[in-house]
Image (cartoon, rainbow, N blue to C red):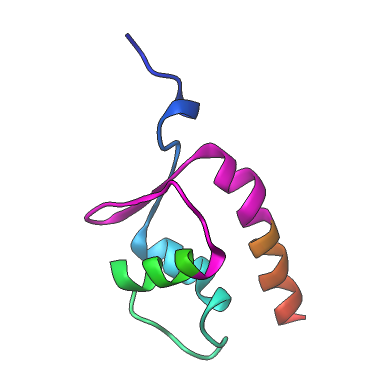
């Protein structure tokens, strides 16, 4: 039996990609934090997400995290740069 992606963790991103993309949530623009599990966990804690998992090399989140919470984070990162 196949499980629809909505029931699992359909949004997956490597630690390096996640840290590069969302580092400005916690760190200043000129800072380059390590692209590690701890950095990703710090970012996710600041955003106050629930129901996510950190694997050995990736962040796993539900589909609604990408569609709601991170849209606001993406917008705030862009406006911080302007």
- Image quarter of residue 5: top left
Any magenta on residue 65?
A: yes
Asked where in the image residue 28 lies, by quadrant, the reply is: bottom right
Image quarter of the C terminus: bottom right
- In the displayed structure image, the side of residue 82 where residue 6 appears, left or right: left
Q: Residue at x 37, y 73 (%)?
A: 39
Q: Position of residue 52 (x, y in %)?
A: 41, 49
Residue 46 is at least partly visible in this image? yes
Residue 68: give x, y in percent of width and height.
Answer: 66, 48
Does residue 36 appear in this view?
Answer: no
Quadrant (top left, top right, bottom left, bottom right) of the N terminus = top left
Q: Residue furthest bottom?
A: 30
Residue 80: say if magenta: no
Q: Height in image: 16 above or below 70?
A: below
Q: Is residue 12 above or below residue 70?
A: above
Residue shown at the point (71%, 70%) measured from the top left: 76
Q: Which residues are magenta?
A: 46-71
In the image, residue 31 sits, relative to residue 50, either above or below, namely: below
Q: Residue at x 36, y 13 (%)?
A: 2
Left or right? Give the position of 14 relative to 73.
left
Residue 33 placement: quadrant: bottom left
**View extreme (left): residue:** 56
Image coords of residue 46 (percent x, y): 52, 70
- Rendered location of residue 61, percent (x, y): 44, 46
In the rendered picture of this protein, how many numbered marks are placed on residues? 0
Q: Is residue 22 above or below residue 7?
A: below
Task: Farthest residue to the top: give it.
Answer: 1
Residue 46 placement, left or right of 39: right
Give the side of residue 53 with respect to residue 46, left or right. Answer: left
């Amino acid at each position: 039996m196949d499980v629809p992606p909505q029931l699992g963790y359909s949004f997956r991103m490597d630690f390096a990609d996640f840290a590069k993309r969302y580092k400005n949530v916690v760190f200043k623009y000129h800072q380059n934090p390590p692209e590690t599990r701890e950095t990703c966990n710090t970012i996710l804690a600041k955003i106050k997400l629930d129901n996510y998992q950190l694997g050995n090399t990736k962040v796993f989140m539900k589909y609604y995290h990408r569609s709601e919470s991170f849209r606001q984070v993406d917008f705030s990162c862009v406006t911080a740069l302007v």
